[in-house]
Image (spheres, rainbow, N blue to C red):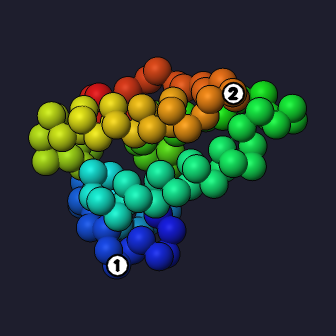
Amino acid sequence: MPDFLHDPVPVAKIGKLGRHGRDFHAVEPRYDHPEFQKAFRDLNELRAAEFDSNPLVEYMDLMQYGFWGEGHTSPLPNPFPDYVTAERTFVAMTRLQLDTWRRTPLAVNTQPDISNT
């Protein structure tokens, strides 16, 4: 998550992980938070203004919203408070991208992430 969103957007602690002998808490942003949604909309609108229908861009990634912007399954808990919030958020984010990218095809990995949406 970009630095300018660290203060306004809360994160959900989803588990403790270890790597290279160090433990750390895995966190994910609350994707449903209005400030996150505003930044996501702005990012897509700015990118589409420059790259939608650019002949050098074959497709745009739909940005599956799991870890690191790609779909993953794992035993870690869902960062959303409930399934309905997760589904509503992901559907709205997908709709935003489908509406924003009108000429460049969108591609998506259909592997579900930990929110199971």
- Frontmost residue, 104 versus 75: 104
Q: Secondary structure at mark 2?
A: loop
Q: Residues within 10 Å of mark 2 (few under 14, many from 20)?
A: few
Work out whether mark 1 precedes mark 2 in sequence or the reverse, and give the earlier one: 1
Tell me the residue at 87%/35% (across/down). 56
Q: Give how far across and how far down residue 19 sits, in percent.
A: 45, 59
Mark whose residue sits in front, 1 or 2: 2
Amino acid residing under circle 2: Arg
- Residue 18: tell me if it is visible: no
Name the residue beneath numbered marker 2: 103
Q: Give how far across and how far down residue 49 sits, in percent.
A: 69, 48
Disc 1 to disc 2, how far (Cα)? Answer: 35 Å
In terms of image quadrants, where is residue 46? bottom right
- Frontmost residue, 31 versus 72: 31
Q: Is residue 45 above or below residue 1?
A: above
Specify whether 106 is left or right of 112: right
Q: Is residue 108 above or below residue 38?
A: above
- Frontmost residue, 17 versus 37: 37
Tell me the residue at 60%/25% (across/down). 107
Q: Give how far across and how far down residue 72 sits, in percent.
A: 42, 34
Amino acid residing under circle 1: Asp
